[in-house]
Image (tube, rainbow, N blue to C red):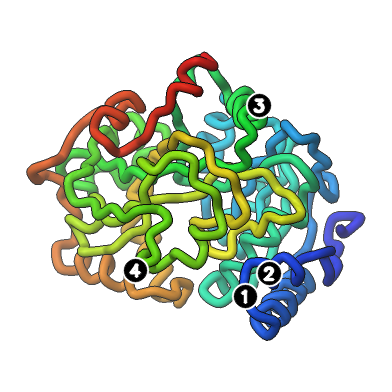
Amino acid sequence: MGSSAGSILPLTSTGETGVQLQYGFGIRSAIRNAWRRAFVRSQTRHLHGPNRWELNDKEVALILLGRDVIHSAPYFLDYYRARGVTKFVYLDNGSQDGSEYFFSSQPDTIVAQCLLNFRDYQAELRYCTACDFAIGGWRLAVDADELLDYWGSGQMNIPSLVDHLVTCGFTGLVAQMLEMVPRGSLRAHEHKTFAECVDSFRCYSISDIETRDYLSPEEPLFFFSSKNKLNNNNIKIMRGGLRRTIFGEECLLIKHVLFKCGKNVLPLPHPHFTCGLNLADFSAVLYHYKFAGPYFEKEKSLNREGRLSHCEGRIRLAAIERANDLVFDFDGLLEDPSVQDLVCQGFLVDQRSLTDAL
């Protein structure tokens, strides 16, 4: 690690290529990926905080890769601190709104910056965020507009949740992403704070979701899912949801949000997957506030700068430009989800072991 603000990270990390070979990437792919990670490290500068967190087997560091996240950042930190998280890693990807300065003012946060294009280096950026700034322990991998919740969260904070996972021998937890929106016009909310958006974005939909068995060979992401051990067959790979209803997007909803790092674990080869995990027998929810705040300008900026590798951003932008607004008012729109509601509706999976632990 770099030894001071402005230092450059080293080019190597022990065992990376071996783990990739273990999970079937092939020698050429593993070497290419190692080279790309080394290049990302050479372009990454440490800005604030210790060089890395050293964690015991039950400690967790929240990792965040972001750009221009100042709108949600204060609420985001308060939310996760209130749930027991005490160590954060923020890798800034070229913010223009001062996000890196905000995080650098926080006493419990490591801040680094890499200006490489997210479109071209997303996997390597996420990998380095997970591996280069903390050793040992667990990672909570969330975006700045995602708020984690789970059965019993009012009685069991995130460190206690990790303690439960360790006791049960689990090394990973999946969450399903749930898009949260206001009823009616989105334009009416674009100048609200993130906290105000969380209060007013009360609606969701689970009526347009496709599910596949987690270990189905027909699943397009079977290469990644097959590297994990599933302990509850009711946990599915979900796609679609509200953004399919509005835009026709095939959004991947499952996300391997919490995982223990180890010598046989490959963090985030895909934005939503980590390989080598013994998965918990229940699922959590990530309340997703993608549409909060200056959403319209943010969508235009992402497309103008060419920072997305898929066509979904262009699909969303075309829909926005046609109507100059988004209006959320259609059959199947529900309000005020709780984890218990989502379990009853079949969106989440509960397990008796977690209930007993409470």
Q: Are marks 4 and 3 in contact (CB under 8 Å)?
A: no
What's the residue type where badge 2 is placed? Gln
- Image x and y of residue 266, in percent: 66, 59
Q: Residues within 10 Å of mark 3 (few under 14, many from 20)?
A: few
Q: Nearer the viewer, residue 288 or 56?
A: 56
Name which of mark 1 and mark 4 comes first in the sequence: 1
User: How far is mark 4 from mark 3, CA to CA?
Assistant: 42 Å
The N terminus sits in image quarter: bottom right
Q: Are marks 2 and 1 in contact (CB under 8 Å)?
A: yes
Residue, disc 4: 313
- Image x and y of residue 84, in percent: 63, 25
User: How far is mark 1 from mark 4, CA to CA?
Assistant: 29 Å
Name which of mark 4 and mark 3 comes first in the sequence: 3
User: How far is mark 2 from mark 4, CA to CA?
Assistant: 30 Å
What's the residue type where badge 3 is placed? Thr
**Does residue 238 lie above or below 127 as drawn?**
above
Residue, disc 2: 20
**SS state under label 4:** helix
What's the residue type where badge 4 is placed? Gly
**SS state under label 1:** loop
Q: Nearer the viewer, residue 214 or 189?
A: 214
The nearer-to-camera label among 2 and 4 is 2
